[in-house]
Image: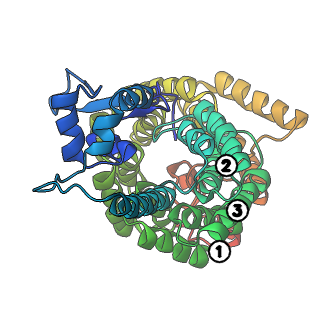
Amino acid sequence: MQPERKVEALPTPDRLDSWKEIAAYLNRSERTVRRWEDNEELPVHRLQHDKRGSVYAYTRELDTWRVSRRVVVEATADEPPSRRIRPVWWVAGILAIVTAAVVVGMQARAANAELAERGTSNDEAWQALQRAAFGANAGRVQIETGIRYYRQATELDPKFARAWGGLATAHMALTWFGERPPSDTMNEARRYAEEARRLNPSLGSAWRVLGNVSHFFDWNHKLAEAQLRRSIELNPQDATALSWYGDFLVDMRRFDEARVSYTRAIHTSPRWLEPAIAISNIHTFTGQPTQAIVEEERTLETEPNYGLGLHFLGRAYLASRDWPKAIERLRKSNEIIGSVPFTLGGLGYALAVSGQRDEAQRIMQDLISRREKGYYPAFPIAQIELGLGHTDAALDWLERAVGERHTGFYFPSVDPIYDSVRSLSRFRALMARMNIPAS
């Protein structure tokens, strides 16, 4: 969940993108439709640049062709008989009835299979779900756009469990990339996830959202782990569930187990960069920022403007006390992601500890002003106060953050920003309220 990326255009609704889809649309075998292309000029297109020779067709062109070749279509079976017998009229009638029944049965089975795969028979709801998918490395804009489309899908088909699960996931992400209180975003995420689970108890996305809400909002970490593990059991290839479980394990300081979960997420979805960055963050959290820098620089070679990666690369430079490189990466991340609370907190802290106190204080005063006008998270203010060396003020703000149930992208139990206060009884008491180990 990260910076805005260019989203590829979705296929047009009447486009079929494989021989399998073309054959299903024409209710014939792939062998038959391939033969029609060779002998009957079936309108099939090819992607000339694709080495695998991908094909596609448009339903409107297939319909026109089917009308013009009605005799051929009606007379052609998938496996031609070895000999033809002229039946009497009543035999022909019986065969027609049987054939119609078979066709109807096949169409019903195909419809049921499609419903099982998609989760809805409403084409408009399905299209809205496709538009809602905000991508693996998304940022705030894509997430907010995704929410609108997920909501549209649930309005078009209130029984569409996948759309409810997507709406729950998007609200979970909005907790970090937006400026709404967790009492809104996480409770909404919980409500949508529970509806998704009611409609489909085997939907893994519903369980993973409930696990995150239990962890971040309820601080019921035992229940959270059970829910996250249930999500993975239902869908072992769900990279999001695997990565979120890794985040949970990091917060609980179970770093070796977290590495295993992140590694599985990377293998499942190699193009998703978040688990690759997350597994590198463990080096920063365990006092090895130089190793984190090496790994995160390598990850960013594939996407240099990946905002979340730049943020945590900046945090790794910060932990290694390389102030100029830390501030450079944190500034760029803040610009790309869109000045969200966790990027402003990290940048303000870096400016403060590097001696650029005036700019750090300006950022902090701006955040305080935002709180006076409405909700804004307390945790980035706590982080900047720590950078300025104001320990008591920092713990005051952290106490407010705990009360708001929003202490940052990672819990203070592992975040190196809090190393200077980790041994203080007041800090340890706040972590005890959150049911997590302070160190």
Q: Position of residue 329 (x, y in %)?
A: 45, 27
- Other residues around mark 3 within 10 Å, as few (<14) / some (14–19) / many (≥20): many
Residue at screen point 36% across, 53% down? 279
Distance from the alpha carbon under mark 3 to that under mark 2: 9 Å
Res. 377 image quadrant: top right
Distance from the alpha carbon under mark 2 to that under mark 1: 19 Å
Q: First in sequence: mark 2 or mark 1?
A: 2
Res 313 visible: yes
Q: Which residue is mark 1?
A: 220
- Other residues around mark 2 within 10 Å, as few (<14) / some (14–19) / many (≥20): many
- Other residues around mark 1 within 10 Å, as few (<14) / some (14–19) / many (≥20): some
Question: Of residues 424 and 127, which is closer to you in this image?
Answer: 127
Q: First in sequence: mark 3 or mark 1?
A: 3
Q: Which residue is mark 3?
A: 190
Q: Taking 393 as reference, is 40 above or below it?
A: above
Disc ID at residue 171: 2
Distance from the alpha carbon under mark 3 to that under mark 1: 14 Å
Residue at screen point 48% across, 39% down? 135
Q: Position of residue 417 (x, y in %)?
A: 55, 48
Position of 13 compared to 238: left or right?
A: right
Q: Taking 192 as reference, is 150 above or below it?
A: above
Q: Are marks 2 and 1 in contact (CB under 8 Å)?
A: no
Q: Amino acid at mark 3?
A: Arg
Please tell me whether mark 2 or mark 1 is closer to you in this view: 2
Secondary structure type for disc 1: loop
Q: First in sequence: mark 3 or mark 2?
A: 2
Q: Amino acid at mark 2?
A: His
Furthest-right residue in this view = 373
